[in-house]
């Protein structure tokens, strides 16, 4: 009996040892099958084993220390920091707004200043130019005065009536000076000679005049005039018309009156 019991106990121990050994051997294979079954890569297996390679690289990355991962990520952060432009500060923004407001104002001021300097330079050059001394270009009042008195003098000097010769003499003494006295006498000599016989009346009207130059108390005026000569000696009066153009030099006397000092008919007879 003891021998039989001993054999039975021995067989039980051997069977338990074999079962334990079999359990230890099968446990790793079951864990591998379970992990392979639960892995996302196993759901889409590839023929060339790329899923296993990707799974292995993912496990390696997971096992890698955190220090290495942070070290690898540092260069990318540094590059992103260098690539990002610095944000402008509040003072920089305020300066930009100030420049946008002040720049047009400064430009306008600069244009005004340059214009003033240009005007001063032009005025200086005009004063040094002989033409700038021509008051006819800069003094309308004086120009109008010269024109008015010259036209009045021309109308009186070149009008003649056989019935009132004293008026012609008075006009000559009032409006003529210098060489113009003799010039006027020569121009009206033919009219005087025939006026009494033909009972003629000469009327002159200045239709237009232009002041060519005013320099101090001297001036030169270009005159356009219409003349009509009427003879009343015959049974029927006869009137002839003519146009005249000439220039006169005038001078201003102490009393303010302008007198004709020279007559230029441009080479034409009266």
Image (cartoon, rainbow, N blue to C red):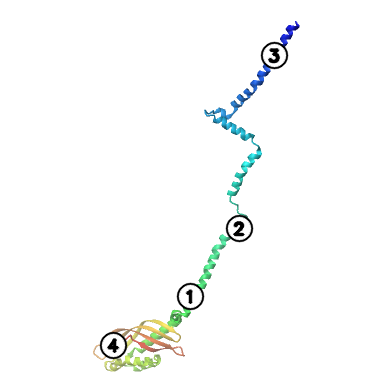
Quarter of the rendering occupied by the N terminus: top right
Query: Which mark is in front, 3 or 2?
Result: 3
Calculate the distance from the C-alpha at mark 4 to the C-alpha at mark 2.
90 Å
Mark linked to residue 230: 4
Residue of label 3: 14
Which circle's residue, 4 or 2, is located before the other in the chain?
A: 2
Which circle's residue, 3 or 4, is located before the other in the chain?
A: 3
**Along the horizontal axis of the image, is 164 left or right of 75?**
left
User: Under tag 1, what secondary structure?
Assistant: helix
Residue drawn 42% across the image and 88% down it: 251
Which circle's residue, 1 or 4, is located before the other in the chain?
A: 1
Binning the other alpha carbons within 10 Å of mark 3 as few (below 14), some (14 to 19) or many (20 upward) gives few
Q: Position of residue 3 (x, y in %)?
A: 74, 7
Residue of label 2: 94
Q: Is residue 52 visible?
A: yes
Residue at the extreme top: 1
Query: Which mark is in front, 3 or 1?
Result: 3
Calculate the distance from the C-alpha at mark 1 to the C-alpha at mark 4.
55 Å
Question: Which quadrant holds residue 247?
Answer: bottom left
Residue of label 1: 122
Q: Nearer the viewer, residue 137 or 63?
A: 63
């Amino acid at each position: 009996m003891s021998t039989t019991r001993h054999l039975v106990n021995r067989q039980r121990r051997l069977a338990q040892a074999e079962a334990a050994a079999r359990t230890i051997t099968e446990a790793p294979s079951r864990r591998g099958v379970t992990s392979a079954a639960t892995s996302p890569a196993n759901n889409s297996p590839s023929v060339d084993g790329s899923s296993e390679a990707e799974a292995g690289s993912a496990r390696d990355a997971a096992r890698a220390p955190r220090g290495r991962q942070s070290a690898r990520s540092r260069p990318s952060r540094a590059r992103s920091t260098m690539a990002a432009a610095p944000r402008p500060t509040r003072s920089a923004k305020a300066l930009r707004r100030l420049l946008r407001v002040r720049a047009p104002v400064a430009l306008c001021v600069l244009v005004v200043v340059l214009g003033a300097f240009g005007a001063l330079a032009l005025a200086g050059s005009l004063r040094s130019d002989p033409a700038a001394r021509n008051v006819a270009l800069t003094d309308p009042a004086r120009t109008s005065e010269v024109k008015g008195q010259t036209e009045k003098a021309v109308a009186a000097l070149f009008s003649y009536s056989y019935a009132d010769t004293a008026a012609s003499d008075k006009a000559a003494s009032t409006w003529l000076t210098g060489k113009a006295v003799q010039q006027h006498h020569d121009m009206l000599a033919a009219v005087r000679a025939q006026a009494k016989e033909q009972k003629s009346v000469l009327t002159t009207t200045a239709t237009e005049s232009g002041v060519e130059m005013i320099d101090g108390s001297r001036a030169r005026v270009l005159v356009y005039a219409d003349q009509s000569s009427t003879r009343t000696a015959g049974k029927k009066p006869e009137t002839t018309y003519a146009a005249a153009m000439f220039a006169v030099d005038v001078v201003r006397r102490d009393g303010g009156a302008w007198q004709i000092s020279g007559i230029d008919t441009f080479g034409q007879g009266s």
